[in-house]
Amino acid sequence: MSGRLLPAPSRIALSRGTVAALAALTLAAGAVTTLAPDARAATTSTTLETSTRDSAESVQYVQDSLYAAGDTGYLHRRALADGSPGPYTWRGYDGSEQALDAYSGALPGEYGYYGAGTDVLHTSASTSGQVQLRDMATGRLIDVTLPEGQYIVAAFGSTLITKEYNEVWQTARLHILRTSDGGATVTDIPVDPPESQFFNDQPVLAGDGKSALIRLRHAYDIGLLDLTTGALTTINAHHAVDEPLRLQAALSPTHIAWYEEGTTQARVVRRDDPTGAQTVVAVPQSGTDTPFVGLAGEWLLTAYRPASGTPAGPGAPLLATPLQGGDPRTLLAAAEPQIAQIPGGGAIAVGQSADGGWSAHRVVVSRNGKLSVQAL
């Protein structure tokens, strides 16, 4: 890797998003169809016959943006009675709440930027190499001084991912920083991209305390980064269009899924065999909406981001499609366009409750693989 390091350009915030989920519902699983890593995806797709956005007059909709989820709770921002944004609030799965004065982590729709997947949040912008983290499980604040020439891109507990630039503003190298309770850097593991590649300037697709999915400069491959060893495993993404910012991805304890916006299929691999057989799963389509994918057990979750300019309101359903093949099942009749992965398994979404209310729900995977949706 050649070239001197330069200061980082300013980050551009992407679009807002919200989340949802709904009443108790139980689903069963089916049989798996897998493809070899070099197999081409089929062209079949499923299209939703109806959308609830224009016919949900009875829904008590309140805009509620989902930002991140951990093992003890999730960060959201529910609109006030006058429609203005409410405070950033960490809501525990036990019903407890903590308000935050500031939050500088990933916005809905940023697909992993600044990380998620733990109870530690990035609560202050990086200024002069200073980063502040807050452990929402304990309330502890952690002030971290980044090494010179490094800029934060993700925080997963006490582990940070940073990037450095070369002289032409390419993200030439990543670093895995392991920090102490006092915020000092204990270890710094440099991570170089695969040969003939650079990292994308928004390199983190998804992650948790163990691994992160990494965007490369070319979208034909993605990288699975081991946050303990720094090993980067290249996964053939089988994308036809070289536009990394169109990629979405999700990590669960057992699977990795990725989806290229504008296509009709997602690909899924076992997390313990990332370069092995890839399962192709049809992603249901909903008019001009953009699917947003997630994972829960042996199911691919799908919510929908409405086209730009669409007024806020109840959206298309939250669906679950069995990885083994089969028709999608409706979890929520109407939902916001975001899904947040819980690192220990399952997901969070915001949507229509059985009583017509609008609130966050937790998608839970039982021991027998069935799904249930619980209002929070």
Image (cartoon, rainbow, N blue to C red):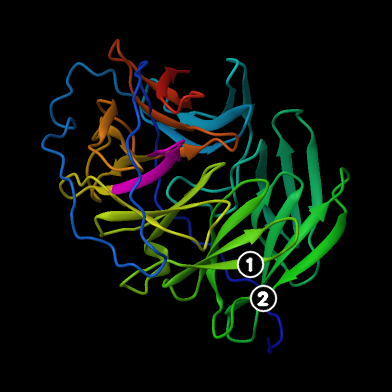
* Figure quadrant of residue 135: top right
> Could you tell me the amino acid type at mark 2?
Asp
Q: Report the Cα–Cα distance between label 2 and label 1.
A: 8 Å
Q: Position of residue 312 (x, y in %)?
A: 27, 36
Q: Position of residue 63 (x, y in %)?
A: 36, 30
Q: Disc 2 marks which residue?
A: 192
> Could you tell me the amino acid type at mark 1?
Leu
The residue lying at 76 percent from left, 56 percent from top is 130
Q: Which residues are magenta?
A: 291-299
Residue 63: mark = none
Residue furthest top in the image: 355
Q: Disc 1 marks which residue?
A: 232
The residue lying at 46 percent from left, 35 percent from top is 297
Foreground of the two, 320 or 101: 320
Residue 190 among magenta residues: no
Q: Is residue 115 above or below residue 61?
A: below
* Figure quadrant of residue 72: top right
- The residue carrying pointer 2 sits among few (fewer than 14), some (14 to 19) or many (20 or more) residues within 10 Å by Cα, namely some
| Tag 2 and tag 1, C-beta contact below 8 Å | yes
Say whether disc 2 or disc 1 marks the residue closer to the N-terminus: 2
Q: Is residue 297 above or below residue 45?
A: above
Q: Is residue 263 left or right of residue 204?
A: left
The residue lying at 88 percent from left, 45 percent from top is 182
- The residue carrying pointer 1 sits among few (fewer than 14), some (14 to 19) or many (20 or more) residues within 10 Å by Cα, namely many
Q: Position of residue 281 (x, y in %)?
A: 31, 50
